[in-house]
Structure formats: structure tokens, C-alpha cells
Image (cartoon, helix red, strand yellow):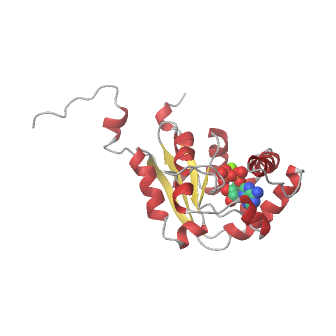
């Protein structure tokens, strides 16, 4: 089995992140926590590629619809539909327009618990509810209600894989194996080595 520090996750700086000059800030936060970037590219995608990306997980339509309904209920609001699949059909249409509207920056980040650590730094899906200190909480102010009223996707700057399995499927969807680079960072010694030695003296 691979060591925990070899876990990888897939991230996209969405078109709004690129337009708002936040790509550097996003990269900085993942670097600062100790993760290692092992792949990156700027690209413009097709609506088909976006739909395939979001439906790699056959449960995504149901889960995302349910999450939206829950988001409305928690605020005492009535969801646009009681049917999760009806909600996600509209979301997917909005996502295709959003994700193809301009260049995006795709990345793979590697390190211990990469999937969970990145989701923690990114914050909850709906910026209105994401905690301060997270990227979505700090830099964007959108909500399900605003997006659904205007029949568009929630603009929340970033995509990040939700599980190790999702990360593996998404990496294969966006990158060729040879575009993901195996290399060492000197800082890994202090972050991961079982024993720290050789720091003192000349
Ligand atoms: P996450 O990106 O946090 O993993 P999901 O996988 O649930 O979130 O949804 C994918 C993306 O679809 C979200 O990041 C957001 O841009 C958009 N989205 C999700 N739910 C809605 C909604 N109810 N209305 C509009 N857009 C939505
Ligand atoms: Mg998701």
C-alpha cells in the first residue's frame, strides 16, 4: 500500500478564480499547508468534458440535489424543488456554462490526507455557509438562492475532489499519467521524516 503522504487530490481554479486574480492565493494556501503540486495546466474545456467530470460519480446527481435541499432547509427557505435530480439537472446546465466561460487552471496536489486537507482549506460548497478562513469563505459571497434565482451555477472559485476514489477518477479524466510528476521537495524531510537529524552544525 502507498504511504499516506502519497495521497493525491484534484483541484480546479474555476473561471471566476482566474478572472479575479486568485490563482496565486489558492496555490499559496495549498503550498503553505505543506502539500506538493505534482501537476498543473491552464485549459479551456468543452461542455461534454464538464458533464463527464461531474458525473464520474454515479451518485453525484442525487447527493448534490440533496445537499442543495438541505442548504435551503437549514436557512428556513423552501428549495426550488423537492426532487434532488430535478435540481441537479438545472445545476449541471449552469455548470457547463460556468466552467466553459473562460480558462481554468487544473492541478494535482500530493501529501498526507491531501483530499481532506484541501477540502478543509477550500470550505463548504455554498460560499454563504463556508467558514471564514477558508478560500470560499474569505473570497466569495455567492449562495444557492442567488444562483438558483438567476438559473446559474454557484460561483465558488474552486473544485476539489471529495474522496480518494473521486480524486483518482478525476485525475485520469483531466491529466495524462505522464503529466503528473514524481519528484521530491526538500521540505519533505522536515514534514514527514520519522526522525529529524542533521540540522545542527556546519
Ligand atoms: P463541491 O464543488 O463543493 O464538491 P458539488 O459537487 O455538490 O460541490 O457541486 C459541484 C458544483 O456545482 C459546486 O461547486 C457549485 O459550483 C455547483 N452547485 C452545486 N449545487 C448548486 C446549486 N444548488 N445551484 C447552483 N450551483 C450549484
Ligand atoms: Mg463535488
Residue farthest along the front direction in this orientation: 76
The residue positioned 49% from the left and 44% from the top of the image is: 110
Residue 187: name its quadrant.
top left
Q: Position of residue 151 (x, y in %)?
A: 79, 68
Which of 76/165 is in front? 76
Quadrant including the C terminus: top left
Residue 53 visible in the displayed image: no
Q: How many marks?
A: 0
Quarter of the view holding residue 18? bottom right
- 107 displayed left or right of 36: right
For the N terminus, the quadrant is top right
| Relative vertical location of residue 184 with respect to residue 151 in this rendering, above or below | above
- Asked if residue 28 lies left or right of residue 170, the reply is left
Q: Is residue 76 left or right of residue 133?
A: right
Drawn side of residue 189 relative to residue 85, left or right: left
User: Is 110 in front, or is 138?
Assistant: 138
- Name the residue at the left extreme: 202
Q: Position of residue 49 (x, y in %)?
A: 72, 62
Which residue does the image show at 19% across and 32% down from the upper left? 198
Q: Is residue 18 visible?
A: yes
Does 34 sit above or below residue 145? above
**Position in image of residue 82 (x %, y %):** 89, 51
Q: Is the residue 37 above or below the residue 7 in the image? A: below
Residue at image coords 34%, 30%: 193
Amino acid at each position: 500500500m502507498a504511504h499516506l503522504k502519497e495521497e493525491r487530490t484534484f483541484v480546479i481554479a474555476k473561471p471566476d478564480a482566474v478572472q479575479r486574480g486568485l490563482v496565486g492565493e489558492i496555490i499559496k494556501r495549498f503550498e503553505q499547508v505543506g502539500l506538493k503540486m505534482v501537476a498543473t495546466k491552464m485549459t479551456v474545456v468543452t461542455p461534454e468534458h464538464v458533464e463527464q467530470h461531474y458525473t464520474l460519480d454515479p451518485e453525484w446527481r442525487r447527493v448534490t440535489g440533496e445537499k442543495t435541499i438541505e442548504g435551503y432547509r437549514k436557512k428556513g427557505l423552501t428549495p426550488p424543488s423537492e426532487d434532488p435530480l430535478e435540481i441537479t439537472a438545472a445545476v449541471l446546465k449552469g455548470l457547463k456554462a460556468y466552467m466553459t466561460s473562460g480558462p481554468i487552471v487544473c492541478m494535482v496536489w500530493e501529501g498526507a490526507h491531501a483530499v481532506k486537507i484541501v477540502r478543509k482549506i477550500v470550505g463548504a460548497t455554498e460560499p454563504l455557509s463556508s467558514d471564514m478562513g477558508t478560500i470560499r469563505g474569505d473570497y466569495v459571497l455567492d449562495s444557492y438562492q442567488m444562483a438558483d434565482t438567476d438559473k446559474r451555477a454557484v460561483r465558488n472559485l474552486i473544485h476539489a475532489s471529495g474522496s480518494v476514489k473521486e480524486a483518482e477518477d478525476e485525475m485520469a479524466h483531466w491529466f495524462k499519467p505522464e503529466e503528473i510528476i514524481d519528484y521530491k521537495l526538500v521540505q519533505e524531510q522536515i514534514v514527514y521524516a520519522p526522525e529529524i537529524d542533521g540540522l545542527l552544525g556546519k
